[in-house]
Image: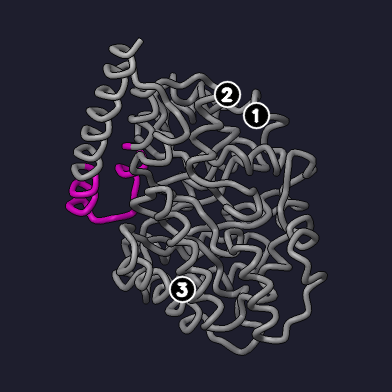
Amino acid sequence: MNIKLTRDLMQKLPKTDLHVHLDGSVRVDTIIDLAKQFHIQLPTMEPTELRKLIVCDENTSSLEEYLRGFDIVNLVLQTKEALYRAAYELAEDAAKENVRYMEVRFAPILHTKRGLNIAEITQAVIDGLKKAERDFPIETGVIICGLRNMDPSISVKLAELAVAFKNKGVVGFDLAGSERNYPAIEHKEAFELSFKNNLNITIHAGEACGPESIFQAIHYCGAHRIGHGTHLFEDGDLLNYVNDHRIPLEICLKSNVHTKAVPDIHSHPLDFYIDYGIRVTINTDNRTISDTTVTDEYMLAINEFHLDYPTIKNVILNGFKSAFLPYKERVRLINETLRELEELEKDELKTTIKMKENL
């Protein structure tokens, strides 16, 4: 199907975002507004200067440096009002580019500095997302994150929280944070609790470390999806296992360059994964920190790896197939997406025919 992949079309296509962090996706203007509202001291209140401190680019040297901006953002995400607003605005921004399903992940433990408990924090985020669902054509879920660099007992508490909110807005449990020197296996108890309660599991792995980190995530911690998986190609046997078992990879191109998971975009294995048949999904990771959108990520993939429309259509469908939703809901979303894609395809072909007739 000869459909030209323009930015305008990519914006219109229905999409998912399965890997997006709440605290990495707060609007800069909102950070300043919240700081003023709750009398919080920021390094600067000037939007351009604050953006320079928070937003990363290809000159960022490591995952650890990339994570520093979160400390500034989380200064303001310490009240129910702030968390509600951040969640609502994230869903609003995603809906503007026709993201039909989004899973928002965050670590509630990072938002307790002003006295909120982790249940209140989680409910505030869910409430913000649910309000957005009523206002915009988007569906959402929440993924609770444990943090690799914190005591594993905290991960257990967060897994308990995720289980308590299962079917009440939370769709999964994750392990995030600095990967190097903090193996996922140390948090095994939290994952045992999760899969004993039939909770979906995704784990950041193979971003700052090699395929052994992905092996741990899958075989010791029961991951159903892998966050990033950038270094999976380094272990052919594990690559085949992931492929054979249709374990999705949550690919985030821009942030992988920023965190130096790859030295540059040309070195990213996305095109190899697609050619090999890996179930890849394309995601933002952090809309603000990486100054990106789902459309930006797709356009980067299209321009860099010369992907055609059938390939992009397949990647889009991978996102819906990989959603942490009950089977019937996934089927409904996939069928809705196929109908919408069919209509857009017809419109694009009509436009192409008209342009040719006018030549």
Identity of the residue drawn at 59% across and 64% down: 26
- Please report contact status of discs 1 and 2: CB closer than 8 Å, yes or no: yes
Image x and y of residue 258, in percent: 70, 42
- Dot label at residue 125: 3
Image x and y of residue 154, in percent: 58, 73
**Region in magenta:** 317-334
Residue at label 1?
265
Local secondary structure at mark 2? helix
- Please report contact status of discs 3 and 2: CB closer than 8 Å, yes or no: no
Given residues 104 and 134, the one toward you in this image is 134
Three-letter residue code for mark 3: Val
Graded by Cα atoms within 10 Å as few (under 14), some (14 to 19) or many (20 or more), the crowding at tag 3 reads many
Residue at label 2?
304
Residue 97 horizontal side relative to residue 207, left or right: left
Residue 325 horizontal side relative to residue 50, left or right: left
* Tag nearer the camera, 1 or 2: 2
Local secondary structure at mark 3? helix
Graded by Cα atoms within 10 Å as few (under 14), some (14 to 19) or many (20 or more), the crowding at tag 1 reads some
Cα distance, mark 3 to mark 1? 33 Å
Q: Quadrant of residue 266?
A: top right
Cα distance, mark 1 to mark 2? 8 Å
